[in-house]
Amino acid sequence: MDENTIDEVSGEAGSFRHWEGVIRSHEADFWKVGEALINIRVNELWREEHSGKQYTSWEDYIEKAWGYVSRAKQLMQTAKLHTKLAEAGMSDDEFRRIAPNEAQAKKLSRAVSLSKEQTKKFVESVSGKGDDVDFAAAAKTLNEIKPQKVKPVSTELPPKERTKAMITALDKARASFNSKVEAVFEEFGDPETVDTWLRKFAEDIFRQLSK
């Protein structure tokens, strides 16, 4: 937190000015920028009655005031990561060493989902390395505690084969549907009854597709 506390500013407009000041002066400690963004968003300080400017939404404020939207999301995620690790005992200096830039902080962001015990284990392991702690050591430790999910190998067919497979599947479905319709006609013969059955059949199909 910056040396100027929220208690030193008055009202929501003062809070807005405070947090915007943090954004402007803490580019190096980018997680503090994220913390400021979180406070502005959560408390809706971007609204005209607080900011003195007309913004249609949070995204509109971020785009017009700072020129980024997707980066804002990552900065806020980094702030959450810093808070979680700080609560488990990690110092700012240690955090700077394991996440010296936004790109490396992003690669460690899954640590936000660690349980309290896992977070403590992670911080103790990284902190125990002293000055040797760095991003590589932190990433290795995190992967041991919470392995990254392996992306499944794509089994997607080439365009021509996929089209052929879809046509075959549709032909089978059409044949199955036609046989069911014929069976209903033979059993009931009444057009209204068949129409009711068709509607119910279609509803069942749509219900299955929407699951």
Image (cartoon, rainbow, N blue to C red):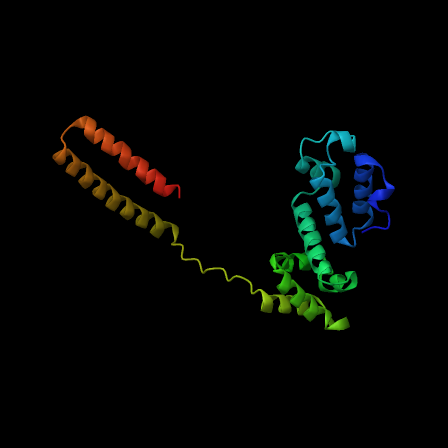
Q: Is residue 129 above or below residue 2?
A: below
Q: Nearer the viewer, residue 108 or 171?
A: 108
- Residue at (70, 38) in percent of width and height: 63
Q: Nearer the viewer, residue 16 or 118?
A: 118
Where is residue 184? Give x, y as percent: 17, 36
- Residue at (79, 42) in percent of width and height: 20
Q: How many marks?
A: 0
| Residue 117 relative to residue 95: left or right | left
Where is residue 140? Give x, y as percent: 63, 69
For residue 101, what is the image quadrant?
Answer: bottom right
Where is residue 100? Give x, y as percent: 74, 61
Q: Is residue 143 above or below residue 72?
A: below
| Residue 9 relative to residue 169: left or right | right
Q: Quadrant of the C terminus?
A: top left
Residue 108 visible to an observer of this rendering:
yes
Where is residue 107? Give x, y as percent: 63, 59
Residue 53 visible to an observer of this rendering:
no
For residue 14, what is the image quadrant?
Answer: top right
| Residue 210 relative to residue 92: left or right | left
